[in-house]
Structure formats: structure tokens, C-alpha cells
């Protein structure tokens, strides 16, 4: 059974940093692209960042480019999101999501077939 | 404002069919066959229902179908059931630097 478990969320002041983690199990992690998708309270979904199966291609939404860094450790079956210079508008539930097609890049060609339950990030003073 | 436009809400009675539209541009929906649809129940994670315009993942009932015409993609649910009541989001590949765009979501109410 595919499982994605996010952690690392919490309350943080504007301008500070936070690192999210996603622990994956139930599939061959290093065969699939992985993504972070967020959802602000009461709002819709927003793709944040994606990373290919081998970390060879990485992409970011314009809203987080230069502030967030995605990475993965295939030996640990884990995905990460380093979030710096956090803003109030980054407040959201952050989901980790798995790409559908094996050996795919991070791009929108690859839909998200499994999602974690999310970790809440609140940016407030 | 979301990159893809969806109606805020749709409704239907049990057994009926409904269609949710998702309108984009030639840079996303109209230019590529990489449209996906996700179902999200309150407090739950999204679930992939349709990918590449009309493909259903294993386990998704065939009551759910997808199509596309020009810059507009559509999700049709036939034989509506109470458990179909949820929010539905479309997404598409886009040639912009973001590569992935979502619609604003549609709340489906089963009357």
C-alpha cells in the first residue's frame, strides 16, 4: 500500500525558515517524480514544486521560486521542501504527491496518483 | 485568480448526470492532452479521478469520464451518487514556466 506521510509543519514567523519532510513507502520511491502541492485554508490547490525520479529536473511555482528548495534522498525514501523567507501567503496545508508514470520528469505531463494527508504551515507573527 | 476556470458549484440529483467544465487556453488545456481531474472530500487529500483527458486510474468507477474540446476540458459523472459530493479540481500541463496549473475547484452538491 502506498503511503506518504508529511511532517515538519508548524507555526513560524514571517521571514523565518521551515523544512518539510515526506516519508514514502509501498512503492519503488526512486522510480517516480515527487511533488509538493499546497492548499491555503478554504482555497484551491496550488502546485509548489516537483522533482524528477533522479533529481535531474526540478521545477518551482513562480510564487516560491528563489525561496523554496525541493530535494529527495532515494536511499531514505524521503522528499523534502526547504522553505526560506516565509510569508503570510505561504500559509497552507502542504501535500506530498507521487507522480503516476515511472521515470518521469517533474513537469505537468505526469499527474499525481497518491497524496499524503498534508502538514499545516502557518506563517504569522 | 486561477489559471484554469471552473464553475464554483454544480448540483444534481441521485442518478442524474452532471458535467464540470475547465477552461484554459492554447498554452495549457487546448494545446496538450495532459488534463487531470481530482476529487477532494472535506478534510481529505485529493484523489486522482481522470488523467490525460480521459483515462481512469484503476479503481475509479466508469461513471466518471473526461473529454476535451478546444480549450475546455470536461468531467462528466453519470448515475450520481451521494458519495460523489465533493470538490473537483482540474489541472493541466502548461507551457509557462510553472508547468502545472490547477483550476479553482468546483463544489458538487448531490441534492
Image (cartoon, helix red, strand yellow):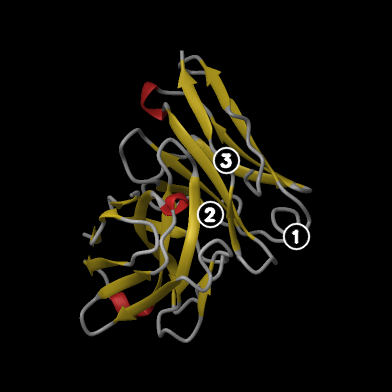
Image coordinates of residue B11 in percent, x first then y, are: 54, 19
> What's the distance in space between the residues labelled 1 and 3, CA to CA?
18 Å
Q: Which residue is mark 1?
A: B27
The numbered mark 3 sits on a residue in which chain? B
Query: Which comes sooner in the sequence, label 1 or label 3?
Result: 1
Residue that protrudes farthest toward the front in the picture: A125
In the rendered structure, the answer to whether residue B71 lies left or right of residue A21 reads: right
Q: Which quarter of the rendering shows the N terminus of chain A?
A: bottom left
Query: Which comes sooner in the sequence, label 2 or label 3?
Result: 2
Q: Residue at x 44, y 79 (%)?
A: A103
Q: Which residue is mark 2?
A: B51
In the rendered structure, the answer to whether residue B100 lies left or right of residue B44 reads: right
Element assignment for label 3: loop
Q: Are marks 2 and 3 on the same chain?
A: yes
In this view, A10 is above or below B17: below
The answer to whether residue B79 shows anywhere in this view is: no
The answer to whether residue B22 shows anywhere in this view is: yes
Q: Are marks 1 and 3 in contact (CB under 8 Å)?
A: no
Q: Are marks 1 and 3 on the same chain?
A: yes
Question: From the viewer's perspective, is the residue at label 1 or at label 3 nearer?
Answer: 3
Element assignment for label 1: loop
The numbered mark 2 sits on a residue in which chain? B
Amino acid at each position: 500500500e502506498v503511503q506518504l506521510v508529511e511532517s515538519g509543519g508548524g507555526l513560524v514567523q514571517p521571514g523565518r525558515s521551515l523544512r518539510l519532510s515526506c516519508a514514502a513507502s509501498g512503492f519503488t520511491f526512486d522510480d517516480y517524480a515527487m511533488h509538493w502541492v499546497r492548499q491555503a485554508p478554504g482555497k484551491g490547490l496550488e502546485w509548489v514544486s516537483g522533482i524528477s525520479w533522479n533529481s535531474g529536473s526540478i521545477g518551482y511555482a513562480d510564487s516560491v521560486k528563489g525561496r523554496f528548495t525541493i530535494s529527495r534522498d532515494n536511499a531514505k525514501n524521503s522528499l523534502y521542501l526547504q522553505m526560506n523567507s516565509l510569508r503570510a501567503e505561504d500559509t497552507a496545508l502542504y501535500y506530498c504527491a507521487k507522480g503516476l508514470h515511472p521515470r518521469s520528469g517533474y513537469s505537468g505531463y505526469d499527474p499525481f496518483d497518491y497524496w499524503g494527508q498534508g502538514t499545516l504551515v502557518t506563517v504569522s507573527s | 485568480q486561477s489559471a484554469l476556470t471552473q464553475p464554483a458549484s454544480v448540483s444534481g440529483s441521485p442518478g442524474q448526470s452532471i458535467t464540470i467544465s475547465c477552461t484554459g487556453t492554447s498554452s495549457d488545456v487546448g494545446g496538450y492532452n495532459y488534463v487531470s481531474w481530482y476529487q477532494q472530500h472535506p478534510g481529505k487529500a485529493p484523489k486522482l479521478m481522470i488523467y490525460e483527458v480521459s483515462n481512469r486510474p484503476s479503481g475509479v468507477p466508469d461513471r466518471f469520464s473526461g473529454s476535451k474540446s478546444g480549450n475546455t476540458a470536461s468531467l462528466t459523472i453519470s448515475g450520481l451518487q451521494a458519495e460523489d459530493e465533493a470538490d473537483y479540481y482540474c489541472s493541466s500541463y502548461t507551457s509557462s514556466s510553472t508547468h502545472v496549473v490547477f483550476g479553482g475547484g468546483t463544489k458538487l452538491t448531490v441534492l
